[in-house]
Each structure stands twice: as C-alpha cells, then as structure tokens.
Amino acid sequence: MTKFIFKYIIFLFLFIACDENASVSDKNANQYSFIKPDDFPDIIFPEYNQYSSAKAFLGQKLFTEKMLSVNNSISCASCHIPERAFSSGSPVSFIIDKDLTVRNVPTIMNIGYYNIFNWDGSANNLDEMIYKDLTIPTVFYNDTNIIVERLSQSNDYKKLFFDAYGTSEIKAYQVSNAIAVFIRTLISGNSRYDKYRRGDKSALNDSEIRGMKLFFSDRTNCSKCHSGLFFTNNSFHNTGTSTHYFDLGRFYVTKNQSDRGKFKTPTLRNIELTSPYKHNGEQLTLEEIIENYDSGGKLFINKDTLIKQLNLDYQEKKDLINFLKSLTDERFKK
C-alpha cells in the first residue's frame, strides 16, 4: 500500500508538471515533421485528404490551438508535447478542468503508418478519430459549430483555410483533416540504432549491441510484438502489466472474452522520452518495465503465453535498457 501511495504522489507531480509545460511546447511542433528516411515507406494520404504544404501548415497551427477546446484551455500539443516525442509526460491524460482519464497518452510519431488507433483499437481512421476528439468529453468536449465560429472570427485563420482549401468558409471536417495531414508528417527514423542498421557500425556501443541481440532473440521474444521498422505489430496483447480489472482494453471494442486486458502494442521508438509507460502509465521507468517482463508479468486472465520469466542478470537488463535508449531520434537530443 505504501508503494502505491508513493507512486500516486509521483503521478500527481508528473501530471501537474506536464500541464505547466504544455504552452512551451506549442512553439516547436513543426520542428519534427516530414523528414522521411529513404528506407521508410511513403506515407499514404487518403484520397479525400491528400497532402499539401498549405494543409500541413494549417494543421500545425490548429494542433497548437487552444480555442478548439470548450473552455480554450488545452490544445493537441497540451498532451502531445513535441519535446517528449509527442507524448504527455503524465501517467494518464488530462481533460477539461484538469480531470483525469484512465489511459496514458501514446506518442503520435509515425502514426501515419498505422491503420488502427488508441490503446483499445477503437478507431481505424485517423481523420475520423480527430473529428470525434473535437467533441467527446475525454478530449476537447466542444461543439463543432462553436469551433467553426471561433476560427471564422480570425482573419489569419480564414487566410490559412483559403490557402489550404480554396475557400475562407471554414468547415468542421477541414479542421480535423488539416490536423490529420500535419500528424501524418510526424516521422521519426533518425536514431543511433537507425544509423547502425544503415551501416554505421560505430553508432552503437558494446552494451547497446548486446542489448539489441538480446531484444531480437528467442530468449526474450521482445521482437515478436515489437517488430518491424516501428517496433510494433499493431496488434493487441495482455502483457501482465496490471492486476486490476477496471480497464479491459480491447474487450470493450470486440466484446470477445479472450480480449479482456489486451492493449495495443506501443512503438518503442523514442521510448526514452515517453515515460510513464503502459496503457495506464503505471510504470515510471524503463527499469520497471524490464523488471516486470523479467518476472513474467503479473497474474491476469488472458495473459499472453509469450510473457514468461526471463531470469536476466543485472548486465543483461542494463544492456536491454541501453539498446532501448538507442531508439531515440537524434532530433530530440538537440
């Protein structure tokens, strides 16, 4: 119980700190967009929402615009903070009037490559998800007519919408579509690990190389779920993170009993910057994550059979953590 209280105090501290720093991050959202490595696939923009630089610029402005929220208090960048690889730094997300949700804010870097979204996979269309976020209580809790009215009172926004859509008559769907275009340009693929796999064998040190080999080994099975360029299979697993049953994850979407406690596999890119971790922000450090997996996870119905006791020694744990830190995009180090 003492450990739980201590963690809860830390959670509150992190939450408050995140909220205070949100406005600083608003200025830097565009710094990380659209630098696509040659070995990354092209981003597929939907036919109804094709890329244009004017649309992306408008989306970046709207991403940091607090008038989208019902009381002008938060923007997308309030939770998706650029310096934190567009995660929040808070265990769970905060909403209007600083109420808390039950889930952690995941990074949105490379989200343009995904086709399913949210921890429970409740969305499969990025543009539609953002449109819904404008109105649902757990995000902006606003009315799209009010949003359009507010933006229409700004000559600057009317010009930006004209540049992007050829008309200064603002539509609600244009707001979410522009944000979606901008978010799809947030690409991360310039880590030291990327330099190593592209041929620069001096990019990783001995500990990181040992950690990489351990990560991709059958002994740990890390890469069974954290696979591919983006270190996620975009599937759902119960990894024995929690012992409570108040958030059943994927089950709420599918209603399948076998999906109870399953959550989407998060990317590991930039994981050094995206703490706290897991769907509920329960684990504060990379050390806690490794310890949880090393122990075989907590007892929970439907726990994935891949989660088993690893019996790693101290150096192996350290090597794994060092490898995970090598996945940080160098742009976030500047």
Image: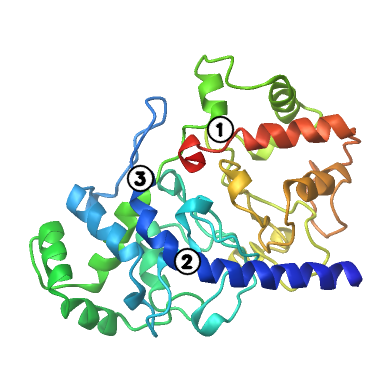
Foreground mark, 2 or 1?
2
Q: Is residue 6 above or below residue 120?
A: below
Secondary structure of the residue carrying numbered label 1: loop
Name the residue carrying label 2.
22
Question: What residue is at 47 percent from the left and 74 percent from the top?
Answer: 139
Question: Which numbered mark, 3 or 1, is in the foreground of this view?
Answer: 3
* Secondary element at tag 3: loop
Residue 240 placement (x, y as % from top left): 80, 54
Q: Which residue is labeled 1 in the image?
A: 228
Q: Who comes first in sequence, dot 3 or dot 1?
A: 3
> Along the polypeptide, which appears first: circle 3 or circle 2?
2
Q: Badge 3: how crowded within 10 Å, few (<14), some, or many (20+)? A: some
- Label 3 amino acid? Ser
Residue 143, position as x, y percentages in the image: 33, 84
- The crowding category of the residue bearing disc 1, from other C-alpha atoms within 10 Å (few below 14, some 14 to 19, many at least 20), is few
- The disc at residue 33 is 3
Q: Residue at x 57, y 21 (%)?
A: 203
Q: How far apart are the two marked residues, 2 and 1, measured between alpha carbons?
A: 32 Å
